[in-house]
Image (spheres, rainbow, N blue to C red):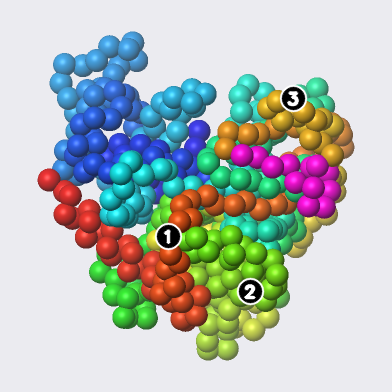
């Protein structure tokens, strides 16, 4: 089940605008107004989950104002005689049955607008003689076999959109289950793009019972003990976000996109300011569960597309001139990654970035904090990015001493693509001998896992390396003005993102009945 619990995804799915490509999920752009699409494509049945965890199935769902209405389906499969209406504010998630592979995609959740803004932005493109193709911004997906079915566990090396930006990513495999000493993974490219997978291995990590493990942006694995939540959490406009980030429950914090002025510096950035009890240790670890919004991925596609017919020349220049690739990577980090700062010596001290992860699945990441200059009873931490780029589900602090762990790197005993060809030799080493996946391609891998030592617990993680190329039209003239703003102006990408979001909101206002 693919989980999108932000408002962004809720409004997109309720409007039934269908699969629109954003990040590693597929969304099909529609040019009709939301009311027309709703009349044509609303699913016959949805399953609604409320914040308390209770669920119900509604037949013939319909959006009426700010409520979701439908006829309730009983446990026996029969419907009641009357329709009920649920305020959207009381809806945590809504799932609909997808056609492909019978999977159920959780497309709706919380309150937000980023995914529907993607739709609005897409429908304002210049008219075309044929319906516009889906937008594609993605990364390879990793599925784990849990003993019964395949479960999405990772979207790998997000942001590696060019060979010069290729990187290694490490991610928890929360669903991976070994059976008879064999662990199975599947990698897949589910969008119209090209994925270049250089290497993939499984990390079997043995640690003390009661601990968990998670990676940082550099792929280092950390043990986590007792986690401490924040005492307060507020966004940059002062809104209380504590309930949104105090539990790993899918109830995310995301930016309020309204009333932002591109000429006001404080409006083109957003994030959270958190206060924790000062653990009075030199080093601690910030633990964050989060993912990027569909809007962030949409803008990544637009940035690449702005190069038009010079796209290949741009890719070539990144390879020829490493300083250009370093500059691009720095810009992407400053604008779209999650900056981490600590209040020390009377000012904010920036300590680095939490890497982008794509919108397909929530990822737990660890960030190491230097607290040597923090004084007083409070530890203040600031998280910052472009508005509407992040969904933050959970934030906590771990100040326990690192525990011992044993890491066993496992390479695929077998790896076969969908045609049955053996590709294991291309996945063992990071040597640019890529396993290339076009749209619809993939491979299944099997790993022989060692036994778990007595008195230890086992966690599995995936380590993958590579990059992916975003496909799109490459026939227009380069948009040099947009590229200059994004690449040369301070926070130019954030300002451009806010401007485009404002335009999308105006579009939405015009098409509402």
Kindly state the secondary structure of the residue where label 1 is placed.
loop
Q: Which residue is mark 2?
A: 324
Mark nearest the camera among 1 and 2 is 1
Magenta stretch, main secondary structure class: loop
Q: How far from the left and from the top, in percent, is residue 52? A: 38, 38
* Image position, residue 241 (x, y; %): 39, 61
- Residue at the location (68% across, 27% down)? 418
Residue, disc 3 = 420
- The answer to whether any part of residue 77 appears in the image is yes
Residue 476 image label: 1
Comes first in the chain, label 3 or label 2: 2
Answer with mark 3 or mark 1, whichever residue precedes in sequence.
Answer: 3
At 84% from the left and 48% from the top, the residue drawn is 429
Tags 3 and 2 touching, CB below 8 Å: no
Where does the C terminus fall, quadrant-wise?
A: top left
Query: Mark 2: which secondary structure?
Result: helix
Mark 1 or mark 2: whose residue is earlier in sequence: 2
Q: Are marks 3 and 1 in contact (CB under 8 Å)?
A: no
Residues at marks 3 and 2, CA–CA distance in whole angstroms: 40 Å
In the image, is residue 16 above or below residue 379? above
Say whether residue 89 is magenta.
Answer: no
CA–CA distance in space, label 3 to label 1: 39 Å
Query: Taking the image as drawn, is residue 286 in sight?
Result: no
Q: CA distance from mark 1 to mark 2?
A: 23 Å
Judging depth in this view, the residue of 432 and 352 nearest the camera is 432
Q: Assess disc 2: are there few (<14), some (14-19) or many (≥20) residues with their C-alpha within 10 Å of its C-alpha.
A: some
Q: Is residue 205 above or below residue 176?
A: below
| Magenta stretch in the rendered image | 426-438
């Amino acid at each position: 089940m693919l989980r999108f619990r932000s408002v962004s995804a809720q409004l997109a799915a309720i409007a039934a605008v269908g699969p629109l490509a954003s990040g590693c999920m597929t969304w099909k752009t529609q040019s009709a107004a939301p009311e027309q699409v709703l009349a044509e494509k609303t699913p016959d049945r949805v399953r609604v989950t409320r914040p308390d965890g209770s669920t119900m199935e509604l037949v013939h769902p319909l959006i009426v104002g700010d409520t979701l209405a439908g006829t309730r389906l009983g446990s026996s499969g029969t419907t009641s005689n009357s329709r009920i209406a649920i305020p959207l504010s009381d809806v945590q998630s809504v799932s609909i049955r997808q056609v492909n592979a019978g999977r159920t995609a959780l497309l709706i959740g919380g309150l937000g607008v980023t995914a529907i803004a993607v739709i609005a932005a897409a429908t304002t493109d210049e008219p075309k003689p044929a319906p516009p193709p889906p937008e594609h911004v993605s990364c390879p997906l990793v599925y784990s076999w849990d003993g019964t079915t395949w479960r999405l566990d990772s979207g790998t090396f997000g942001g590696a959109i060019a060979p010069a930006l290729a990187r290694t990513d490490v991610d928890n495999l929360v669903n991976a289950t070994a059976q008879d000493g064999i662990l199975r993974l599947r990698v897949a490219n589910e969008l119209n793009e090209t994925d270049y997978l250089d290497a993939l291995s499984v990390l079997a990590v043995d640690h003390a019972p009661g601990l968990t493990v998670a990676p940082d942006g550099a792929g280092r694995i950390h043990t986590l003990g007792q986690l401490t939540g924040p005492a307060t959490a507020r966004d940059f406009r002062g809104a209380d976000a504590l309930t949104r980030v105090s539990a790993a429950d899918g109830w995310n914090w995301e930016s309020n996109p309204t009333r932002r002025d591109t000429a006001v510096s404080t409006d083109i950035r957003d994030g959270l300011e958190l206060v924790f009890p000062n653990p009075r240790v030199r080093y601690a670890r910030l633990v964050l569960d989060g993912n990027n919004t569909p809007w962030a991925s949409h803008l990544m596609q637009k940035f690449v597309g702005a190069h038009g017919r010079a796209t290949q020349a741009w890719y070539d220049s990144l390879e020829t001139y490493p300083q250009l690739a370093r500059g691009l990577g720095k810009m992407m980090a400053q604008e779209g990654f999650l900056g981490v700062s600590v209040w020390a010596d009377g000012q904010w001290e920036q300590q680095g970035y939490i890497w982008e992860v794509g919108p397909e699945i929530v990822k737990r990441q660890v960030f190491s904090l230097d607290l040597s200059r923090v004084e007083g009873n409070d530890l203040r931490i600031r998280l910052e990015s472009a508005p509407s780029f992040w969904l933050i589900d959970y934030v906590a602090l771990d100040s326990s001493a690192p525990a011992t762990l044993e890491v066993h790197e496992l390479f695929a005993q077998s790896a076969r693509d969908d045609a049955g060809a053996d590709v294991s030799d291309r996945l063992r080493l990071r040597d640019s001998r890529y396993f290339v996946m076009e749209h619809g391609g993939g491979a299944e891998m099997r790993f022989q896992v060692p036994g778990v030592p007595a008195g230890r617990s086992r966690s599995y993680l995936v380590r993958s390396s590579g990059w992916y190329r975003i496909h799109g039209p490459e026939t227009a003239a380069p948009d040099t003005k947009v590229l200059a703003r994004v690449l040369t102006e301070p926070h130019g990408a954030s300002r451009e993102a806010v401007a485009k979001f404002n335009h999308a909101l105006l579009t939405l206002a015009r098409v509402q009945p």
